[in-house]
Amino acid sequence: MKKLGIVLLALVLCLGSALALAEYPDRPVTMIIPYAAGGTTDVYGRTLAALLEEQLGQSITVVNQGGASGSIGSQYVYDQPADGYTLLVCAETMGTYRTMGVCDLGYDNFTVISPLVGDPKIIVVGKDSPYNTLEELLAAIKEKPGKVTMAHSGPGGSGHNQGLVLGVFGYDVAMISFDSGNAALLGVIGGQVDFTNPNISTLGSYIESGEVKPLAVFASERLEAYPDIPAFTEVVPEAEKYLDIPYTVLTFCVKAGTPDDVVAALKDATKTVLASDTWQEFVRKNAANRIFEQYTTDEEIKGFYDHWQSVVCWMQYDAGVAPVSPETYGIERP
Amino acid sequence: MKQKCLHNHSLQEGVLFLLLGGALLRYGLDSHSKSFNKDWTQSAYLFPVIVALLLGALAVMLLVQGVRAADEKQAARGGEARRVLVVLGMTLAYYLALAVIRMPYLAATVFSLTLTLSTFEVATFAFLLVLMLYLGVRSRKVLLTVPLATTVFLSVMFRTLLRVLLP
Amino acid sequence: MADILSVLSVKFVLLVFLGSVAGLFVGAIPGLSVSMATALLVSITYTWQTNDALAMVMGVYVVGVFSGAVSAILINIPGAPSSVVTTLDGYPLARKGQAYKALYYATIYSFIGSVFGLVALALLAGPVSRLAIKFRPMDYFLLALFGLATVGSVTSKNYVKGLISAALGLIVSMIGLDPLVGTPRLTLGISQLRGGISTVPALVGLFGFAEVLSVIFDGHMSQTVESMGHERMSLREVLRHWKLSLYSSLLGTLVGALPGAGGPVAAFLSYNEAKRLIKKPEVPFGEGAVEGIVASESSNNACIGGALIPMLTLAVPGDAVTAIILSVFYVHGLKPGPMFIRESASSFHAILLASFIACGALLVLGLLVAPRISKVISVPKNILLPIVTVLCVVGAFACNNRLFDVGLMFVFGLVGFLMRRRGYPAAPMVLALVLGKTMDSNFRRAMALAAVADNPLVSLFGHPITAFLLVCTVLVVLSNIPFFKRLTHRKKA
């Protein structure tokens, strides 16, 4: 009788521990995309979700919760329990919410599963523009400070930040904010604005069709897909220290405090997905920066985001764009 | 005369909108002076100020209309305001039920369609039943079938087919 | 022609039909929107072949836009902002027992409008997109202003009240993060308001819940429609309005091609034009004139073809639905842009073919469903209203997955109810809410461009399109001011 009791007890304990260790995920998962459907974040997020579904063996419902530079959706994820059942694919604005006074969230509030991609930016002018090279454009900016117009995709976004980098080196441009990178590009094609800096994924075939003239890649290296377009640092070498980071950064994360085994399961699955042919092909087609291969260990990832935050937040604050000092949040000057 | 003014709808509304416009103007000007961007063309408060001025002008026109029509008698259409309040109360209760009560999910699969029983289903069924009773439906058959059919239809449609996260 | 037909297969046609049936449901149920359905389809069709996915999506899109008119006519709740205009004459007609007639007209003219827009897409995509690029920030602002100026006049006998409703809508649209600088405005410290107020809770509240409250207030619970007319209509009789329909379709296509304006503006402009052109309709406008339905439905369906033009040739979505269709393209590795029609000809043909098949499905479904669904109007109100209330709640919730929007829906419902009681039309408010952000950001963008230009005034107004829109807007406003109205009447007399 006593034996039977012990066996039963052992059985219950086994069951109990089995329940506690029930494999994540044991029910459908939600992925929040804090932007409207159709944007860069949405496209990469959905592609990731579809591939991740196969790895996790559970369906992933993708929900777009756009608005307020992505802070609404991010806040929603932050308000959910840290159990790994609500995932977030966010863009770089996550790093600047606090200093821009949008909300109190930052990368620290989330555990990064993996950086995804960076979208390279290219400086372009319209086909009828008098400027044919980056040198000519920069000379014109020097000559008429504040008169040459630049279209960008919105305050605190990657395009705006790029304009601020120009400002750091004494190139004073009139920045005109548009609703999206694409709208900014159309402003240039329509001849209303002098130049802009679209993400390569939205630039699409405008270069081939000849509607725009590409002047430079806004990075320290040329792109594999467009070897003829010079890198920005070839003309302005001193910009090097601002250009070692991509300005459009997509990140896959969950709320901070998610149990380690769940994070590990997600990391494993994501690693497989990011190495898959479908993903690689997709990234190659879009000529994206492969930051998911550059930063893989926890230290590298943390180092990357800390550095990014410090460069961008301070630049925005110094330019008078961000109302809150990065010091308030302990972000050191680069 | 005074009595008339108080009961004149155009005058009431004119004053209301004038106040609203004034408040918006005040808000726009105040906020602009506090923001660190001092350039009006790029200010976030340019548009609010313009709309406030527009609303103010429209309110004045409404007041003018009101003064002109002050002598005309305005027959207010009678209605059942109490019923509206009761229905508002019911919907508020429904809203609170959805917001506050957390029920466990009970799911059953029938012909590959998942039927779920949770807060939304229970609250919706009850809400429909009570509201229909209040609006004077007396047939038992209708009182049972309509709420049931509606709830099941919505539940299946949203949870299973559209994958919306219902409460 | 041969390569156009090469996409055709039985499966392709079936998928379009499947999408069409889904679109009929989604569009007709208040609160469920076509954009929601297409967003869902992006996930479902991810693993499909591109053409199959396009077939389904186009089916939902084309028929979904039409079926917004069904609920607009039968229960006075437009399925989407672009069907708001259809309520103006559709609902009065239905209440006279002629719901079937209203639905029949809506079906026929939605079909004509859709086909017109798609033909424009097939033949004139290049020129139209070049025209769209010419629109400057100031032009977008003026176009929206023009829309608001006309909506004030067509929806209310009292122009001032119409404009006040529009102004209130503009104030609501300002709530949330400002589009250019990113500072929170009018959020009253409520964090959920930072994202702004979505159209769906406002639309569902102002029309749906307000209607429920109004009927309850009036207390005609068991009132049924007097006689359900099932008059036979000869097609010839119905097609009498083809001129108006073509004109409305042209307006719809052009406005649809301008990103950001879209269906609601097109429908209001066409309605205004119909009112201006047709001096003696059989039934006055606003009391069940079929001309109103013709104008509204032709133009909002023509917007489909129009909105696809900038999406395909410029990768700029014309409205919320095309924004999502754009992500279908990206997810399937297609790159819309200036080279799209030439480089991805087969996808372009698939879109055209799917849309034309969907037009056929629209006609078939519309004619099949109209006589059956028109009986909804005879369901006793005390059964219909509770169901409508629940639909309002679910619809408001589903657009953003948050209960906060349901609360907003109640507030808008109450406001809409009070506005109705005092003779303020709700339509201008909805239109202003849809257009507010565009107006705000484009106005300031125009100012910013003017500020650095050598001659600010020329930069603002010195362009032909701008001048034209400015004149139109001024004329609409002046023609509605009583003083000028009297002046023109005297001249005629």
Image: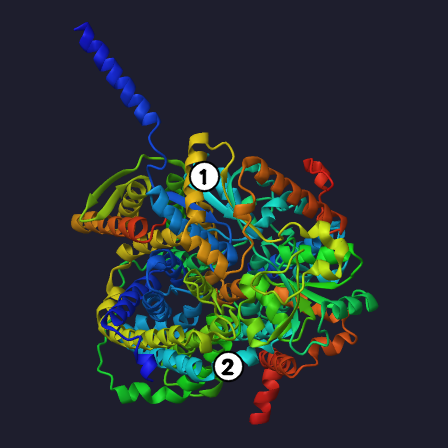
**Do discs 2 and 1 belong to a common subunit?**
no
- The x, y position of residue C420, in whole percent, is 46, 62
Residue B165 visible in the current orientation: no
Look at the image and tell me in which quarter the C terminus of chain A lies: top right
Work out whether residue C226 can be spotted: yes
Establish if B107 lies above or below C362.
above
Name the residue located 74 percent from the left edge and 79 percent from the top edge: C458
Which residue, given by chain and number where applicable, does mark 2 sit on? C126
Place of residue A21 in the rendered image (x, y in percent of width and height, measured from the top left) = 35, 27
- Per the rendering, the mark at residue C107 is none
Q: CA distance from mark 2 to mark 1?
A: 47 Å
Q: Nearer the viewer, residue A142 or C489?
A: A142
Q: Amino acid at mark 2?
A: Gly
In the picture, the disc for residue A267 is 1
Under circle 1, the secondary element is helix
Quarter location, residue B58: bottom right
Which is nearer the eye, A53 or A85? A53
Disc 1 marks a residue whose amino acid type is Lys
Q: Residue furthest right?
A: A143
For residue C226, what is the image quadrant?
bottom left
Mark 2 residue element:
helix
Q: Is residue B124 above or below residue C222?
A: above
Return the chain for callout 1.
A
Number of the front mark, 2 or 1: 1
Q: Position of residue C364 (x, y in %)?
A: 25, 75
Q: Is residue B118 above or below residue C95?
A: above
